[in-house]
Amino acid sequence: MEKVFDAHIHHLLKVPMNRAVGILQREFEQTGTEGGCFLSVPHEAGPDGIVHTEHLQNLKMLFFKHVFGENHYAFAGLMHPSDYTDRKAIKKDFLRQAEEYLSVGFDGIKMLEGYPSLLKARGFGLDDEIFDDFYAFMEKNGHPIIIHFANPAENWDREKASPHAIMAGRVYDGTYPTKDEISAEVFRVLDKFPRLRLAAAHFGFFMGEKQNAERFLGAYPNTYFDITPGGEQFFKMLEDWEYWHGFLLRYRNRIFYGTDFYAFSDADEETWKTLFLRRPRLIRQFFETDTEHDYMGNPFRGVALEKPLRDRIYRENAKHFLNPRTPVDKAYLVREAERLTLVPNKESPFADEDLAFILDTLKA
Ligand SMILES: [Zn+2]
């Protein structure tokens, strides 16, 4: 099996950390994943507009990096306050957080701030000046950001949205910013900070938008796409494969592999396999074969990408996007775990159990 470096790994499912480590290990082995980036997502919002905070996210990602070691990286998420009245103080704090995270072993920042439900709940965009000192710091020091913005275009159209998106409440009416508005925010950020080292997760959801895809990589020197599947975007490339093949060739240094990997519960072996193999298998069938396959009821034919291009996407390009791996500050991990132990009412599932496991492992 060809080896891959998965730049898009999360831990958000209800699996305690002491099990997650072993599960991830087995999932990595079975998918040929030889390294990757653990991405922190400390805040999420549903259609009810309530923002949830998972206090342990940053700690967990840095802990994974420490445990898995060589070839593994961690991206922190900015912790937001529940109230944005003191904008000056928050702006300063975003910068302070970034400086802290990048000095203790995180390799970059993951932004979910462009997610439609979070944009709506918070009422300000990615180009709000509240982020400016943070962006300026990241740009000046060449620190990487992986950003999720928008979602598949179909999610703005109830007629076309997938049943899964509708069920999950990811269908957007006029109370949400439009997809174009969100893209415009991203381009304004890049126009202001053009040398930002910025990777758009899920291809920026631009697989159906040639002009935007072209502008995102073509107009700025340090931008990247991760190819993490989302909303079956891969099939949009098939509608004009000649164009997209040319695109992948033209930007052959700027596109890298990711799958939205998780430690799935292994309570049931069959379900576990189906879930963790789903996206890695789609990517491999798509890029490595020229035969017919089915992805969740969608038939498609693989494109059999040339091997040298696949090598870049699978492993090499993420390394250009990332800076040399920094060591994890173990004392910081211990301090953070001890601090979080004292925080009351944490929303994280298994918070106390996870903190105990992390401290035990670190002190062993
Ligand atoms: Zn993700």
Image (cartoon, helix red, strand yellow):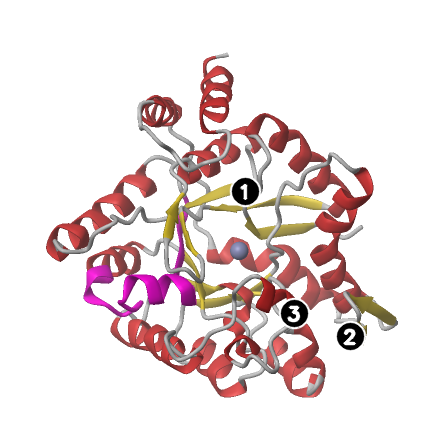
Residue 271 percent coordinates (x, y): 77, 45
Verify CB contact (< 8 Å) between mark 2 and mark 1. Answer: no
Q: Secondary structure at mark 2?
A: loop
Q: In the picture shown, does residue 16 fall above or below 357? A: below
- CA distance separating discs 3 and 1: 24 Å
* Disc 2 target residue: 303
Q: Between disc 3 and disc 2, whose residue precedes?
A: 3
How many residues crowd mark 2 within 10 Å: few (<14), some (14–19), many (20+)? some
In the rendered structure, which disc, 2 or 1, sits on the residue that comes first in sequence?
Answer: 1
Secondary structure state at the residue bearing disc 3:
helix
Residue at 34% from the left image edge and 21% from the top image edge: 338
The residue stretch that appears in magenta: 107-132
| Residue at the spot 47% in from the left edge and 83% down from the top edge | 212
Q: Could you tell me which residue is drawn at 47 percent across and 58 percent down?
A: 321
Q: Nearer the viewer, residue 200 or 249?
A: 200
Q: Is residue 122 magenta?
A: yes
Label disc, if present, on residue 163 of the rendered structure: 3
Residue type at mark 2: give it. Val
Q: Residue 343: give x, y in percent of width and height.
A: 31, 28
Q: Are marks 3 and 1 in contact (CB under 8 Å)?
A: no
Nearest the viewer among 31 and 180 is: 180
Task: Name the front one of labels 2 and 1.
Answer: 1
Q: Is residue 155 left or right of residue 243?
A: left
Which of the 4 image quadrants contains residue 160? bottom right
Residue 357, image x, y percentages? 51, 20
Amino acid at pointer 1? His
Image disc number at residue 11: 1
Residue 19 vertical position relative to residue 2 in the rendered view, above or below:
above
Q: Residue furthest front?
A: 48
| Residue 114 at least partly seen | no
Q: Residues within 10 Å of mark 1 (few under 14, many from 20)?
A: many
